[in-house]
Amino acid sequence: MNDADGDAVLLRDFAARSPRALARAISVAETGRGAELIRRLYERAGHAMTIGLTGPPGVGKSTLGSALVRKARSLGKSVGVVSVDPSSPFSHGALLGDRIRLAEHFTDAGVFIRSMASRGHLGGLAGATADAVLLMDAFGKEVILIETVGVGQSEIEIAELAATTIVALQPGSGDSIQVLKAGIMEVADIFVVNKADHPMANQLKREIRSMMEMLAFSGWVPELVVTQAISGAGVDDLWRAVERHAAYLQSSGEIVERRREAFAHQVRQLALGTLQRKLDRELASEIVAGADPYSAARSILRTFGVDTEEPEEGGRPSHLRASVKG
Amino acid sequence: MNDADGDAVLLRDFAARSPRALARAISVAETGRGAELIRRLYERAGHAMTIGLTGPPGVGKSTLGSALVRKARSLGKSVGVVSVDPSSPFSHGALLGDRIRLAEHFTDAGVFIRSMASRGHLGGLAGATADAVLLMDAFGKEVILIETVGVGQSEIEIAELAATTIVALQPGSGDSIQVLKAGIMEVADIFVVNKADHPMANQLKREIRSMMEMLAFSGWVPELVVTQAISGAGVDDLWRAVERHAAYLQSSGEIVERRREAFAHQVRQLALGTLQRKLDRELASEIVAGADPYSAARSILRTFGVDTEEPEEGGRPSHLRASVKG
């Protein structure tokens, strides 16, 4: 069976909603060979409710994610989960435990769970995640949860693939304030203070409110929800906040802008991956003996048709109409 | 006074070894206007002993760095320190304390200390750091210490600007093993177990040795040194290990390869910064209505003269010193 035949079978099974076909499509994309598949399936996507869930290690993110999946299932919605492992040196080894917490959903055919840790993808981990979300969406998943251990800016970007981003914080952790200071504040649509029974839960709520007062919001103002994911307390509140945010995105038309940004981000990562590989080949062949780094960089940039004699402003006039299907 | 006159004065003061001229040259480079300066000073560099020092927050890295500076000064060497602040959300706020620990050297004219946290540089933080190291080297600093809070791969890369990379780990911390698992193992020339009096110091030594048994080394096998930086115990041993490694690099000729890699890394970062800016301009103007991400990326890549009909394979990153045994 050649590739084209294989693709045809895969597309047929995918259309017939075979979970194995979805798994295989994601695997194909993950290894950097998904361009044709995604080209074929792209127009089916764009209907899912996508929820990003991020926060520092130990916050109880997976218990929270699992509770959200349970809630969505109780409403009869089919669910996809993308669990992202950034393989960071400081992810505190919580990942195996995280997966175990999702195990209650493994036997539910309405829930499709995929862990991503691929570094082989053209667009890096963010690209692999974006492909997985797009494929789950095209497959017909109604709710897609993108779960990341938020240990850095790139993991936050992954959560931003979602239309709605939940940032979970835990009381009594200095990390939380570090998170807020480091720009994670600005990406949250909903804050969750998990571990509601913690003696410092109220203090964290006050801290988040103070931080929010320092920011100017146009449109949506982030909601603050208190949960205790292990007991399930507050999960209904959280779900209602997610639904309110989704309704806001639709009624304000902001969903179009969010999708445009996520799309632009994915295109950027894909193009950047290819540029980096070409750059590495040029580096291997073009380093000139005795040149200083700036002269060498200039010489390499010429092979990309980029001239760095003059710092550029603006760029070439746009000849194509910029827009993305909403 | 125009720019050319200003540059001439700066170059004259730099040649006269004015620390203010060095500080100013680094500032110029940090704001992305250093290409001409570096072109002029490049041939003077290449003589310094460069030492990278990295490790997780809390390991006592700055106390260790300060002890190394004291040792180098006792040997009559002039010293430059580049202290890198990656501004990570999880850097645990230790940075101010770190700087305070270096304060004993502030009044020593033979020690030049520079903190880097610039995001404005063409080549990002790594580029700004590389420029600072190059300028200190050209200035005549004999020992240059590059200190980073190792919270991610990019910070490790910064330490790798150095000919000799020291990875400091602390006993009784789960982080340490995470660090080892995450590829930091492969970049270390010297491991330091700091806080020698900790009850779990011996266990950490055993763990590091076990990890090393899983790796294949060609040439230098990383040394393992135990220190107690606060009391100064073990710092002489550490310095001797650094000198042995420096001698090995010279005698094996590997120093040439290391410098080439550091150079290639810097050129890569510089070129990549420019490519990313052009990419972002193209993104803003070229996103095609209805296109899928792969088709859009392909269209943008054509503006760089890159054709992406076939995905290409990337190789192993060149900065890894060791590979995992098959």
Image: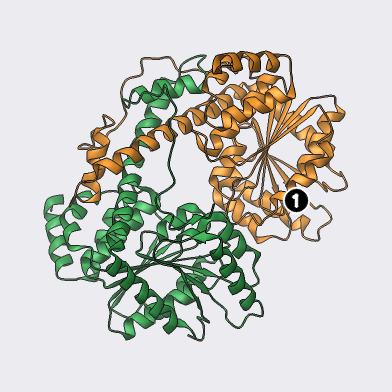
Chain colours: A orange, B green
Q: Looking at the image, is A170 positioned above or below residue A131?
A: below
- One can see residue A116 in this view: yes
How many residues crowd mark 1 within 10 Å: few (<14), some (14–19), many (20+)?
few
Q: Looking at the image, is B19 positioned above or below residue A80?
A: below
User: At 81% across and 46% down in the image, what residue appears?
Assistant: A227
| Residue B162 rendering spot, x and y as whole percentages | 36, 63
- Chain of the residue that carries numbered disc 1 in the rendered image: A
| Residue A263 rendering spot, x and y as whole percentages | 53, 26
Depth order, front residue of B107/B37? B37
Toward which corner of the image does residue B299 lie, by quadrant?
top left
Q: Amino acid at mark 1?
A: Gly
| Residue A111 rendering spot, x and y as whole percentages | 78, 30
Depth order, front residue of B289/A17? A17
| Residue A232 rendering spot, x and y as whole percentages | 86, 43
Depth order, front residue of B8/A74? A74
User: At 64% across and 30% down in the image, what residue appears?
Assistant: A163
Toward which corner of the image does residue B241 lie, by quadrant?
bottom left
Left or right of A70 on screen, residue B242: left
Left or right of B95 on screen, residue B203: right
- One can see residue A226 in this view: no
* Label 1 element class: helix
Q: Residue at label 1?
A: A97
User: At 38% across and 53% down in the image, what residue appears?
Assistant: B126
Mark count: 1
